[in-house]
Amino acid sequence: MGGQWSGLDGAGQLAGFEGCATVMLMGSRFRFSDRFLRVTNAEFEGVRFLRVGSLDELSALARVEEFDLVVFECARPDDLALRLDGFLAAAGSAQIALTYPDDRSAQRMAHFLLKQRKLRQIGLWPAEAGLETWWALVRLLLAGRTYHPSCIFDVLQNGAQDQSAALEEGLGAGLTVREIEVLHQLSKGASNKLIARDLDISEHTVKLHVHHIMRKVEVCNRTEAANWYMQLQR
């Protein structure tokens, strides 16, 4: 599947977009058409939208560019199990959204992401949504939030029940609510920098929380702390 880096010059260097937020769209020209790119780039001031056709192209661009949001076309839910690690690696610290073709596919994708403990950090978007809806979803994720459709609320509820159990056990171990939030991020493999950004605190504060967590749950490192937390959710 071929790709296009809209907004790049012929040498593949970024041309005239310094300081802009970057939204990467990985998918087919059918899904992200030339017209879609033109009108969307015109709609957003200070944001550029680029399209690539493959994960290899996205990974190559990721070596020289940081993204703010990456939207992956996911036409077949079964592919997600094979491609999720690649999606996450290429996206880096960017917000992530996956498109889905229908409600049943969204539910299957949500179940898989829940098992991988990624559902809370990855948005799911209806592929057939109108242009105005897409623009609203882009604005939502660029503001640091995420979106899940109502068709997967049952899946989200199950995930919330798991987190409630972990919260109860964590408080019983003497952890504060903030320390449990940090521990939840640790269990997802997040770095101190990402935790600080997500919780709107400093990296130094994150380090202090991690130190207190390890002391309270009697472990030697952050990996053991994350494993301790994940055991609570089983």
Image (cartoon, rainbow, N blue to C red):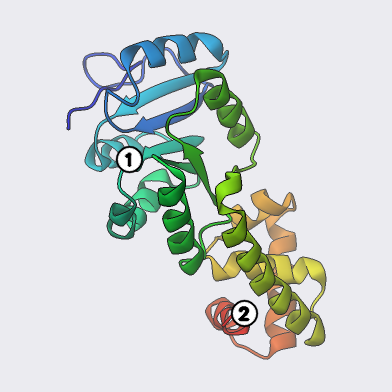
Q: Residue at x 32, y 60 (%)?
A: 81
Looking at the rendered image, the quarter that the C terminus falls into is bottom right
Amino acid bearing label 2:
Tyr
Looking at the rendered image, the quarter that the N terminus falls into is top left
Please rate how many residues cluster around mark 2, counting C-alpha atoms within 10 Å: few if below 14, some from 14 to 19, many from 20.
many
**Nearest to the observer: residue 189 or residue 64:** 189
Q: Position of residue 112 (x, y in %)?
A: 43, 62
* Left or right of 176, for residue 80: left
* Left or right of 124, for residue 81: left
**Nearest to the observer: residue 137 or residue 157:** 157
Q: Which residue is mark 1?
A: 63
Q: Position of residue 159 (x, y in %)?
A: 61, 66
- Helix, strand or loop at disc 2? helix
* Left or right of 15, for residue 158: right
Q: Which residue is mark 2?
A: 229
Q: Position of residue 153 (x, y in %)?
A: 62, 54
**Nearest to the observer: residue 195 or residue 156:** 156
Q: Position of residue 148 (x, y in %)?
A: 58, 46
**Nearest to the observer: residue 9 or residue 233:** 233
Q: Residue at x 64, y 73 (%)?
A: 162
- Mark drawn on residue 76: none
- Helix, strand or loop at disc 1? loop
Q: Relative to residue 125, is residue 198 depicted above or below?
A: below
Amino acid bearing label 1:
Arg
